Amino acid sequence: MKYLFIQYPKCSTCKNAKKFLDENKIEYIQRNIVEECPSYEELKEWIDKSHLPIKKFFNTSGNLYKQMNLKDKLKNLSENEQIQLLSTNGMLIKRPLLVLNNKILVGFKIDEWKNII
């Protein structure tokens, strides 16, 4: 079974996650989050599967998040509007994402990844 690994090639956390997957011989399909931004439908499904709040899917430390002043704006957006916003630009999405059959890993926390994989 191949997993879907969504990452940004210049991101050091993504590079560490990729190294972890390779060292553990985990098969995956790689996808550049900027070149192929997740769609609204994909994000909706992943957020539902993850059981995490939508806020966890935002790259809150990213420049675009800060430039758009989303810390304040998100409070006034519905869940659907937030997902729609995420689907407009991959740089707004926390990365990497690892999409498993029944679980979604957001960000790279090595202990969490070891437990699931």
Image: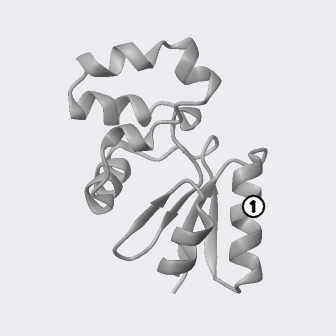
Of helix, strand and loop, which one carries label 1?
helix
Q: Amino acid at mark 1?
A: Asn
Percent position of residue 12, x then y? 77, 49
> Viewer-proximal residue, 40 or 114?
114
Looking at the image, which residue is at 42% across and 19% down? 71
Percent position of residue 37, x then y? 53, 43
Looking at the image, which residue is at 38% across and 77% down? 101
Looking at the image, which residue is at 74% across and 45% down? 11
Looking at the image, which residue is at 32% across and 52% down? 52
Percent position of residue 110, x then y? 62, 67
Pointer 1: residues within 10 angstroms few (<14), some, or many (20+)?
A: some
9 relative to 57 in the view: left or right: right
33 up-or-down from 117: above or below: above
12 up-or-down from 29: above or below: above
79 up-or-down from 9: above or below: above
25 relative to 93 in the view: left or right: right
> Viewer-proximal residue, 6 or 13?
13
Coloring scheme used: one colour
> What residue would you read off at disc 1?
16
Image quadrant where residue 6 sits: bottom right
12 relative to 74 in the view: left or right: right
52 up-or-down from 78: above or below: below
